[in-house]
Amino acid sequence: MAIGPDAAISAPRFEAAAAPALSGAGWRRLWRLKWGMGGAAIFLAIVLSAVFAPWIAPHDPLVVDIRHRMGPPAWMEGGTREHVLGTDQIGRDLLSRVIWGGRVSLVVGVTAVLLSSTIGILFGLTAGYFGARLDWSIMTFINVMLTFPFVLLALAVIAVLGPSMPNMIIVLGVTGWPVYARVVRAETLALREREFVLAARALGGSHARIVFRQILPNLISPIVVIATLQIAQVIILESFLSFLGLGVQPPTPAWGNMLGEGRVYMLNSWWIAAFPGLAIFVTTLVINLIGNALRDWLDPHMKL
């Protein structure tokens, strides 16, 4: 059949599919993930500066130079490039002390969180898996623990053991585990009735094997999120205890005791307390940004 020149030729049309629009929750999640990546980059810089403090810090943080005591930062009148952030009340370089203080705070934060997470996970798995009276006993113990004010508990423990960095880690570790226990218990109660757990029991798997090989791997996401956010809380608590003189003792540089020493000079030499306080603020802020981003990324119910 011939086709005339005036005949209309119909051809299929292909239209580009429109990209799915992000919901309000999706935009918020994407925004948090971007902020989380930025926070991770800043936190990595803080960690690296703490790890390589002996090579990065321009001065020994313990060296005293009375001639340059209370020297202002380099950009202020009377400041020098030798002490970029100025000096403290006895002439020690503030930049060096802030860098070394980050090492103390991070070590305390990570170690205390490892201790509290280990205790909480073990209690939570035990309570959730075995249930019954054991579950009731553990949860009652947790509720009793939560009734004690943290400051009073810290004062009591440190009064017995004495103020030091290891004792502070113990205090922060043994007071932070209930949150892990509660979350792990709740998740374990749901997981213990799942098909893969019942199948492992039917095959004769031991309780320890089922708990640590079948249940625990499914709890990694909430544990990681809680641990990340708790590091920020522990750094604040460590700074608070050191500020009160119950934590790391001078002359060892720690952000908390630097803040406590510098508060006396806030009117005339504000930088002595301001820079350690700024370090605490920035570190806890970026860790919280990372924790929020991890929570959104690992939560299967939050989709773009």
Image: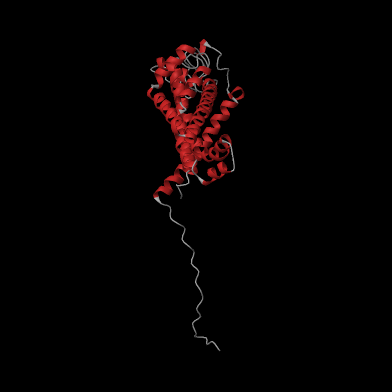
Residue 277, located in which quarter of the rendered image?
Answer: top left
Residue 82: x and y in percent read: 55, 20
Could you tell me which residue is drawn at 52 percent across and 34 percent down?
A: 42
Residue positioned most to the top: 66
Could you tell me which residue is drawn at 45 percent across and 42 percent down?
A: 32
Observer able to see residue 286 = no
The residue nearer to you, when weighing 161 against 219, is 219
**As drawn, 96 above or below 139:** above
The residue nearer to you, when weighing 125 against 1, is 125
* Colouring of the image: secondary structure
State how many labels appear: 0
Residue 69: x and y in percent read: 49, 13
The residue nearer to you, when weighing 301 against 71, is 301
Q: Is residue 44 left or right of residue 289?
A: right
Residue 159: x and y in percent read: 45, 12
The residue nearer to you, when weighing 290 against 187, is 187
Residue 272: x and y in percent read: 45, 19
**As drawn, 27 above or below 59:** below
The N terminus appears in which quarter of the rendering? bottom right
Residue positioned most to the right: 55
Observer able to see residue 138 = yes
Residue 155, located in which quarter of the rendered image?
Answer: top left
